[in-house]
Image (spheres, helix red, strand yellow):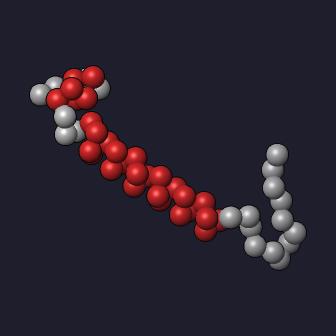
Amino acid sequence: MILRCRPGTAGPGGRAHAVLVTISLALTLAAYELLVRRTRVTRFLSGMRG
């Protein structure tokens, strides 16, 4: 379903979408840094050497 607005009105959730994308990217990178890169077991399971 495509949401359409009347001409001259603001679009649905443009700023909220940008905030959500930014927060989810930050959480994904933080989880990768803390859970994958820091421990030997998760490095092995994800196929990283070392």
Asked where in the image residue 31 lies, by quadrant, the reply is: top left
Residue 26 higher or lower than 44, as above or below: below
Q: Nearer the viewer, residue 3 or 16?
A: 16
Q: Quadrant of the C terminus?
A: top left
Q: Nearer the viewer, residue 45 or 9?
A: 45
Residue 25 higher or lower than 32, as above or below: below
Give the x, y percent position of residue 7: 85, 72
Direction right: furthest residue: 6
Q: What residue appears at the point 27 percent right and 22 percent down from the top-left corner?
A: 45
Give the x, y percent position of residue 43: 22, 29
Residue 9 higher or lower than 22, as above or below: below
Residue 43 higher or lower than 23, as above or below: above
Q: What residue appears at the point 75 percent right and 73 percent down from the top-left corner?
A: 10
Give the x, y percent position of residue 37: 22, 39
Taking 16 as reference, is 11 left or right? right
Give the x, y percent position of residue 6: 87, 69
Taking 20 as reference, is 6 left or right? right
Taking 24 as reference, is 43 left or right? left
Direction left: furthest residue: 50
Q: How many marks do you count on the picture?
A: 0
Q: What residue appears at the point 39 percent right and 55 percent down from the top-left corner?
A: 26
Query: Is residue 7 visible from the viewing direction of this image?
Result: yes
Q: What residue appears at the point 83 percent right and 77 percent down from the top-left corner?
A: 8
Query: Is residue 48 visible from the viewing direction of this image?
Result: no
